[in-house]
Image (tube, rainbow, N blue to C red):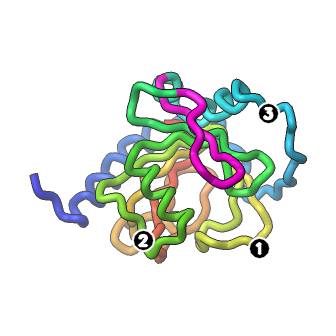
Amino acid sequence: MNLSKRNLAFLAVAAATILVTGMNFRTVAKAKTPVQNSPTDASDTTQAKIARAMSAGPTDFARSARIVDTDAQGNLVVLREGTNRFTCLPGDPTVIGEPPMCADIAAMQWTADFKARRPKPANTVPGIIYMLAGATQRSDSDPYDTTSEAITVGPHWMIMWPFDPTTTGLPARHKATGAYVMWAGSPYAHLHVMGNP
């Protein structure tokens, strides 16, 4: 079946809308809370990193996911092989914008393109990223903001696809519950859904 980009976006929005209506928002943390970086913990063992990485995804996915970390040069290091199509990363709790996450193949491509500052993501299908352990970030509007005060975001998940607030009707501002388009107007705009799926 040959689906246009617009049809794929519509299907992703429809799927997200269905999932959002059944969400449990009890664990949503207060948004826009400043955070402090903690000192690097020298006792961050491989097992601690694996546990932190797994905390980002739904249990069924994380249990069988490949777990990877990055070395000092930014290269991926496999901490544990997996048996499904998800990869979980422990992130770095001392760095704003480096939370634990679990992502599928398309979302891993999206993330690699974002970190490499490519003009736009190369994934040709929507990807999904889970950050169910929460995250820190600088901005909901500027993908490469490095100066704004850090904010804490509660458990959430994202569909990595170029969502547009004007065609989807979704807001482009931070919300503590529900869904919104993060980094709207940039090539890295995506659907940000608060809460656990």
Give the residue displayed 60% in from the left and 31% down from the top.
79
Query: Can residue 66 be found in the magenta stretch?
Result: yes
> Contact, CB < 8 Å: mark 3 with mark 2?
no
Find the distance from the CA under tag 3 to the CA under tag 2. 34 Å
Q: Visible in this render: residue 51?
A: yes
Badge 3 density bin: few <14, some 14–19, many ≥20, Cα 10 Å:
few
Q: Which amino acid does label 1 sit on?
A: Thr
Specify start and end residues of the magenta stretch as a single range: 64-80
Find the distance from the CA under tag 3 to the CA under tag 1. 27 Å
Give the residue displayed 86% in from the left and 39% down from the top.
41
Q: Would residue 66 appear left or right of 164 to someone viewing this image?
A: right
Element at label 1: loop
Residue under numbered circle 1:
147
Q: Which of 64 and 155 is in front in this view?
A: 64
Q: Which of marks 2 and 1 is nearer the N terminus?
A: 2
Give the residue displayed 34% in from the left and 71% down from the top.
167
From the top left corner, tell me how far across and down residue 194 is, in percent.
56, 48
Query: Residue lying farthest left?
Result: 1
Query: Residue lying farthest right?
Result: 39
